[in-house]
Image: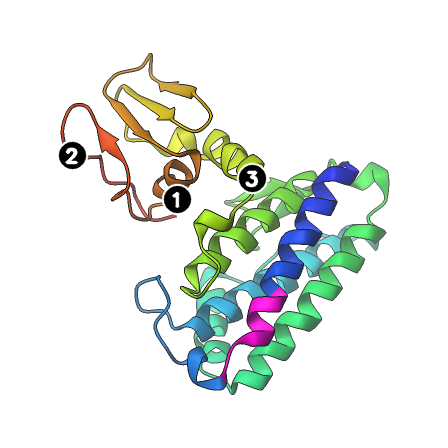
Amino acid sequence: MPDHAQLEELAAATRRLVRTVDGMSDAEYAEPSLLPDWTRGHVVAHLALNAEGLAGALRGLTEGRSVPMYASQEARDGDIAVLGAAEPQAVRGRLLGAVTDLSHAIAAVPEEAWDSSIDRTPDGRRTFQASSVPWMRHREVEIHHADLGLAYSRADWPVAFAERLVESMVGRCPDERITLHATDLDRTWEVAGGGPRVTGTVTDLAWWLTGRSGADLTCDSGAVPAMAAW
């Protein structure tokens, strides 16, 4: 079962996101985000649909039913494309309703159901434990909030969040020996026994591990390795 601190951190991150979205002008929805081929409207749409999918899956657990997060990967992608191109008021409204629904769905999950598995899509190829939902959603909110390319950036992430993000994503490093060093925490992570050292703040390391820019990092063997998109 998620602990109180996890849920409070998610709630705080969600409030920050909602303030940003509430402050967006209609014109900003059609402007490019930091993600390839996605406008800011698409990012907000994704955050809304992600919350709806997680809320539906958790409600299913509460009701004793198995409900996948998405009907299919194609449906998920298509829904983002459609909602992302909708009127800003509709996109904003979906997000606000979805984050409320997800909060209620999390609160309603019986303690014994948190160990249950949830299918991402009906084919069952990707599953996750219900107890991982608060952290999954927390990552989505913080990372994609920064992807909007507005006033909120990765520099605004709480350090504890960035550190946990590095811990959860360090396994995405290329299949070779590498060492990550967070200068602001004086903390090091070794992959496959350690190797060339990639150095920067914990926030910049976390940003890079999600497949985003590593321009603010250095590597003692030359160029910072490229990361696959997350």
Identity of the residue drawn at 49% across and 85% down: 26
Q: Which of marks 3 and 1 is nearer the N terminus?
A: 3
- Name the residue at the top extreme: 193
Where is mark 1, residue-wise? 207
Is residue 45 among the parts visible in the rendering? yes
Q: Residue 108 location in percent, x, y?
A: 84, 52
Q: Which amino acid does label 2 sit on?
A: Ala
Identity of the residue drawn at 45% across and 57% down: 146
User: Quick check: marks 3 and 2 in contact, CB under 8 Å?
Assistant: no
Q: Would residue 199 be found to the left or right of residue 224 on screen?
A: right
Relative depth, front residue between 32 and 45: 32
Is residue 116 among the parts visible in the rendering? no
State the image quarter where residue 192 is shown: top left
Q: Is residue 19 magenta?
A: yes
Marks 3 and 2, Cα distance to the nearest angstrom? 26 Å
Marks 3 and 1, Cα distance to the nearest angstrom? 11 Å
The quarter in which the N terminus is drawn is top right
Give the overall secondary structure of the magenta segment.
helix
Q: Does the magenta stretch include residue 171?
A: no
Q: How crowded is mark 2: few (under 14 residues within 10 Å), some or many (20 or more)?
A: few
Q: Would residue 35 be found to the left or right of residue 18 on screen?
A: left
Residue at disc 3, secondary structure: helix
Which disc, if any, is residue 173?
none
Q: What residue type is labelled 3?
A: Phe
Q: Which amino acid does label 1 sit on?
A: Trp
Where is mark 3, residue-wise? 161
Where is mark 2, residue-wise? 223
Question: What range of the chain is rendered magenta?
Answer: 18-25
Marks 2 and 1, Cα distance to the nearest angstrom? 17 Å
With respect to residue 200, does 188 lie above or below?
above
Residue at disc 1, secondary structure: helix
Q: Residues within 10 Å of mark 3 (few under 14, many from 20)?
A: some
